Image: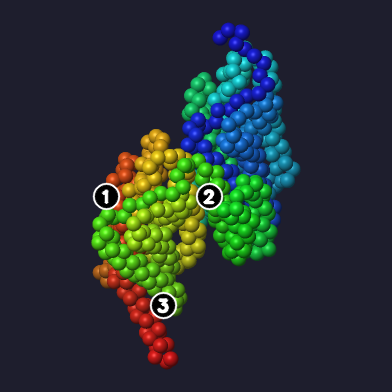
Amino acid sequence: MGQENCTIVTEFILLGLSDVPELRVFLFLLFLLIYGVTFLANLGMIALIQVSSRLHTPMYFFLSHLSFVDFCCSTTIVPKMLYNILNKETTISFLGCMVQFYLFCAFAITDVFLLAVMAYDRFVAICNPLLYTVSMSQNRRMVLVSGCYLCGTVCSLTHLCLALEIPSYRSNVINHFFCDLPPLLSLACSDVTINELLLYIVATSNEVMTIVIILTSYLFIVITILRMRSAEGRRKAFSTCASHLTAIVVLQGTILFTYCRPGSGNSVDTDKVASVFYTVVIPMLNPLIYSLRNKDVKEALRKVVGSNSFLRSSLQGLADGHIAVIGHHCEHDDIDSPKEMFSKELSHAATEGDSFLFSELYMLTVVAFNFSLEIMQNQSFVTEFGLLELSENPNVQKIVCVVFLFSFIATVGGNSLIMVTVGKPALLGSPMYFFLAFLSFLDACFSTVIAPKMIVDSRYERKTISFEGCMTQLFAEHFFAGVEVIVLTAMACDRYVAICKPLHYSSNMNRLCGILMGVARTGGFLHSMIQILFTFQLPFCGPNVTDHFMCDLYPLLELACTDTYILGLLVVAHSGFTCIVIFSLLLASYGVILLSLRTHSAEGQRKALSTCGSHIAVVVLFFVPCIFVYARPPSALPFDKMAAIFYTILTPLLNPLIYTFRNKEVKNAKRKVWDRIMGACNER
């Protein structure tokens, strides 16, 4: 490259993760959600360790510093990345680039050494438990943590000083989403062999040193655990170490792949994906790994969250923060105020302490949905869509109207009866029926999203739905469908525990019911947000008549005036793959249940098969049509209407009938409820 092409750079341009405009809002909301979870989880972990006396141990002292470093590392990268995604100008000043690189490098190296120190802490705790408190005294803990920060500072300063010595660059365009050293060195005009060699040596030395400490520590830990006579002691030791090992494997693996190989700057796209893991994903996963895998953290969290005053003040602060960030985007009158949205959810979240994380995720998703609706609603020339019914014959439409009207009434009535019946704890006080009541509620809501609009349209010649109404229907149907998929999985888990581990059924499932329902709600919101983001990217500027009786993804893809091949594949990869994987897991779980029935009596086998038969029938009716529609090459086929009728109309109708006719306990409970109703009427 000639010297005349080299210039002194005052600012750099970051190309980001992707140059596809259709993915802009999707990436923004995805990383905004991840950063929100990172922010909440890491600062929540720090606060939890500070306020909970049972976590005032050396292990959680190091964990609080790990959470702090993860939070700082993510904050160094993600906010600037989010800003660049939504703006055409993705520049960063030379000084800002150097500061970002220095902070990222310092926190990343500190993170690596902290994991090594935590491995040494586990070694002392398990191999020398009597000397643990003395060996890990407060002074020694401060020395170890200070050493981690010192190593991170020295290494990053070394790289920064050498990078500042580069006099000129061939270009100011960095093919990355943040200022990292390898892509920066690839733009230098001068010889940067020393920089690249030092980067390789420092990164490899740090990785080798920390990995040797970690492997040595865990080798002695495993030897000590295997010598333990108590099975409970072995289980507890493995449990406390498992979370640490998980964090180590994820972080060290991606750093080794990126920096500890020659010419790491050449595979730019691969390096971007790896960088997303150790800059964005891992800071989010670390607190979740330690909280979900650690009994002490979960117990401390349960006690702290048990205080309504603590929860209310925490959620109010979080709500105010989100309102400050997003509120200036909601200036139109047709979008609800974020303050009103948060106040409604805050009053509900404060009364149910165990679900505060899911409530916060819910609030983030609702605001993101309204925010994305405002951003994207003006990108389409189409203000309404036309819908086609099952048949253009007026006589057939009348028949369809009557049939689906009675089907809808039977669906709402049957599922409401299930909820009323199961709502009597004296009749059906079992986790299985708790899930059944929730499934009936979902079926009633799912049918209500589709059937009323379909019934009304069958009476009119012109069948239209507004753009906002179409997006709302799409969001609602995928939300309830996503929640139902997870609820059916939870019901399979319930049947597995009830049949394979009956002695622990009540204790395990009573504890898991609320958690599983929270996961279902959160999963449904995330699934529907992904689907709605796919659709928001589409420009509609031509025909607006969809060959369907409802707003669904494939018919809308057919109307888009752009190439939707990639988006179609993403829909298949997301919805279709999810349906296939969960359906396969459900079949495998029932295979395990059937194998376990070999040791049961004939009466026990009959009863177990009877309770499982209704669930299997529901699973087949729901998943087979969904797989047919979404797990195939993206295209809208005439058969999709019939398949959609199965999972939107017939399945919600048949579910209460299946559980009624296939389940003796439900029939007896319904009979008791009916007798009480008739008795009350006779008394009047």
Q: Secondary structure at mark 2?
A: helix
| Residue picked out by circle 2 | 369
The one of 613 and 365 positioned closer to us in this rendering? 365
Residue 653, horizontal then vertical, whole percent: 33, 65
Q: Does the image show residue 44?
A: yes
Q: Secondary structure at mark 1?
A: helix
The one of 331 and 36 positioned closer to us in this rendering? 331
Residue reaching furthest to the bottom: 683
State whether residue 663 is above or below residue 216: below
Residue reaching furthest to the right: 139
Looking at marks 3 and 1 on the same chain, the residue that comes earlier in the sequence is marked by 3
Q: Which mark is residue 639?
A: 1
Query: Measuring 40% from the left and 84% from the top, which residue is drawn there?
Result: 677
User: In the figure, residue 390 lies in which quadrant?
Assistant: bottom left
| Residue picked out by circle 3 | 427
Looking at marks 2 and 1 on the same chain, the residue that comes earlier in the sequence is marked by 2
Query: Measuring 68% from the left and 63% from the top, which residue is drawn there?
Result: 309
Gap between marks 2 and 1 measured at Cα: 31 Å
Looking at marks 2 and 3 on the same chain, the residue that comes earlier in the sequence is marked by 2
User: In the figure, residue 404 lies in which quadrant?
Assistant: bottom left
Q: Quadrant of the N terminus?
A: top right
